[in-house]
Image (tube, rainbow, N blue to C red):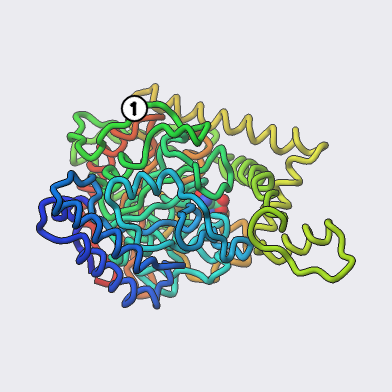
Amino acid sequence: METRSAAAIAVGVRAGECSAAEVARAALDRVAARDGALHAFLEVFEDRALARAAEIDRRRAAGETLGPLAGVPVAVKDNMCLAHGRTTAGSRMLEGYRSPFSATALERLEGAGAVIIGKTNLDEFSMGSSCEHSAFGPTRNPWDVSRVPGGSSGGSAAAVASGMVPLALGSDTGGSIRQPAGLCGIVGIKPTYGRVSRWGLVAYASSLDQIGPLARTVEDCALCLSVISGFDPLDATSSREPVEDWALGRRPGRIVVGVPGFARAAANDPDAWAVFEGLLASLASAGVEVRDIGLAHADHAIAAYYIIAPAEASSNLARYDGVRYGRRAALPAGASLDDLYTRTRAEGFGREVQRRIMLGTHVLSSGYYDAYYLTALKTRRLIKGDFDAAFAGGCDAVLMPTTPGPAFALGEKLADPLAMYAEDLYTVGANLAGLPAISVPAGFVERGGARLPVGAQLVGPAWGEGALLRVAGVLEEAAALGAPIAGA
Ligand code: GLN
């Protein structure tokens, strides 16, 4: 089990206390031993990882300066293009697809010395909250393998929580980094929209998608986020806001967090809510001011999100037509171009993706556009206004649970899409508002003889990742869990 943090590994490799090659070898061995039961990985790059680690050791021996993630084994969600191996986005549509280029975030990761170990499982095209919508079978929660790890970045979360790797990348459109981080007992941050380049990220809903890190400590998330953030001319929505070394953050002085009333009203798992209240009490005794606030439109976030995200998805996924990318259906002689589109899309997309495309096409269609899409956009604006008012009123961050409850059983919500969507109650608001948000382990609940983690989430002002990470560090300390590893 890798008990060291990413930060500690990078320090050790740079100081020559351990070699990148032995760190990579150990990570690959853990994946081989552990992943049969979890299925966190879709592909493992053994030869490439060992070769890149050897290269880092060679550069160290030659006296070159190594980057901040020198020799750190990282797992990457398989919706990020890498010019090596396959990029499937968890879909039959892209089965066997090989990207000719790499995502900017992955180039930055490797530029900082990280060693990519493999690609992780996800809900198809990142649509889901359980990892069960992957075309390649579900990932299991390392705390209880009869339960889901959350989604859509469930493979990345399980890979970190089980100690196979100390660090992973995920993407978050409506909670896909924070929700699996919460359900797997680790830390995950979705940065401000525009902070991390989306170049090379397989698009789901482009006005919401952001890449971010998952790790066992806030410090590791900060370290990685500093590396992957920053302007990229290849992404028109990427920002020129300056990027700092967030890992060097000092402890903040006075902290005020606002707990929204809707969070309490919506809480339906008494055990998980009790953990959250316990955290509030620890924060108060650590000198943090905890205030009640209103987020008046938060109740409408799920409805607005499940209009806007499918609308954008229906447009983004129009490109998978059997002509340009990935799968092409075999057709009988005399078939038309329409047959090609229809058969390819019927074969290539799973049920949930088809549901989203139909939803999205419907809410954008003439006659329904104003009633659904336009209303959702107005709601989005109001939701952003609520967060802005909380920050203007003196809150450093808004604090709420990451999810309504702990990890649910495999299959439990599969037949009920609305129950699955309700899982995103607390997470979608930050995406709609474009704000940075982080999930930190809050504690454990007992369920069916297993200890299951639950997370707490902080949402901060735009471009305030530095302050948000510092507050998250205080939360991490208050919860006093010590970054445990599942199954260790
Ligand atoms: N569960 C949400 C959805 O299915 C969010 C997924 C995500 O953030 N990619 O859309």
Residue at 33 percent across and 58 percent down: it is 185
Visible residue check, residue 227 = yes
Q: Nearer the viewer, residue 228 or 485?
A: 228
Compared with residue 254, is residue 101 higher up or lower down, i.e. above or below?
below
> On the picture, is 184 further left or further right than 4?
right
> On the picture, is 270 further left or further right than 485?
right
Q: Nearer the viewer, residue 264 or 358?
A: 358
The image position of residue 241, as x and y in percent, is 38, 26
Q: Nearer the viewer, residue 34 or 132?
A: 34
> On the picture, is 143 further left or further right than 340?
left
The image position of residue 6, as x and y in percent, is 23, 53
The image position of residue 323, as x and y in percent, is 72, 55
Residue at 58 percent across and 44 percent down: it is 205
Q: Which residue is mark 1?
A: 242
Is disc 1 placed on a helix, strand or loop?
loop
Compared with residue 419, is residue 372 higher up or lower down, i.e. above or below?
above
The image position of residue 384, as x and y in percent, is 51, 30
Q: Quadrant of residue 308?
A: top right
Residue at 44 percent across and 34 percent down: it is 232
Other-residue count near label 1 (Cα within 10 Å), few / some / many at <14 / 14–19 / ≥20: few
Find out if the beta carbon at label 1 lies less than 8 Å from the nearest ligand 1 atom. Answer: no
Three-letter amino acid code at the position of disc 1? Pro
Residue at 22 percent across and 64 percent down: it is 21
Query: Dividing the image into 4 quarters, which one contains the C terminus?
Result: bottom left
Visible residue check, residue 130 = no
Q: Nearer the viewer, residue 209 or 342?
A: 342
Count all numbered tags in the image, as a single digit: 1
